[in-house]
Image: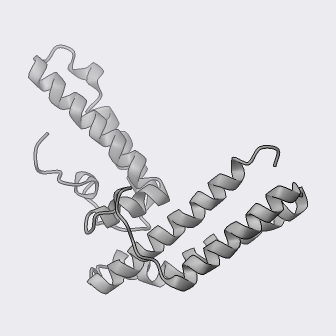
Amino acid sequence: MNNKHSDYYSFYSISPCFFPDISELKKKYYGYSKQYHPDFFTLEDKKKQSEVLELSSYNNKAYTTLSDFNKRIKYILSLFFDVSEETSHKMDDDFLMDMMELNENISEVSIENDEDKMNGVKEEIEKRISDLDLSILPEMKSFDVGNREINLLEKIKDYYFKRKYILRIQENIANFAGL
């Protein structure tokens, strides 16, 4: 693939942002899906077919990533930081203590096998995610209008890892048998 499209945002000719116009994104995706559909290039040489297949695949990956909020956050941060699964991120002690208490509460409720209490815990987790999301909105909006200061990006990165941590707890609860 040519180097013109070094990232998904440049591929779609839009600026990196946390809150893109999803209808515009979808329109660009469908336009490229038609333009780079492999069936339209069956009579071309193997090199051209390979290039089109690569562009079609890239278009699918770009859209899948940019249309999903969690993937989009990770992708934007990956443009500035290493946010791979192996990356360790130091979270503040208060957050970690809070999560430890939450995990203890989940353990107690799951041992009791009390569905009503577990539903209360689930609601508490939803509220924590919502509060966390609301707390970072000003920074994300500032990024979307062009602010690329490192301290702003660090706050968003911290948010990303905290949110990921809470979502993992939420996922673990969903996997508890019988609840």
Up-down: is 17 above or below 54?
A: below
What residue do we see at 86% from left, 64% from top? Answer: 117
Expressed as whole percent of the image width and height from the top left, the position of residue 73 reads 41, 64
Name the residue located 25 percent from the left edge and 22 percent from the top edge. 40
Up/down of 22 relative to 60, above or below? below
Residue, x 40% and y 51% (percent of image)? 65
Which quarter of the rendering shows the N terminus? Answer: top left
Seen from this angle, which residue lies furthest top? 43
Name the one closer to the observer, 59 or 29.
59
Q: Position of residue 166 (x, y in %)?
A: 59, 66
Q: Is residue 23 left or right of residue 123?
A: left
Image side of residue 62 versus residue 111, left or right: left
Q: Position of residue 168 (x, y in %)?
A: 58, 58
Q: Quadrant of residue 143?
A: bottom left
Residue 29: horizontal and vertical position, in percent?
A: 36, 44
Instruction: Give the vertical position of 88 relative to 115 (above or below).
Output: below
Say whether residue 79 is visible: yes
Name the quadrant containing residue 153: bottom left
Asked whether the viewer can see residue 130, the reply is no
Closest to the observer: 160 or 100?
Answer: 100
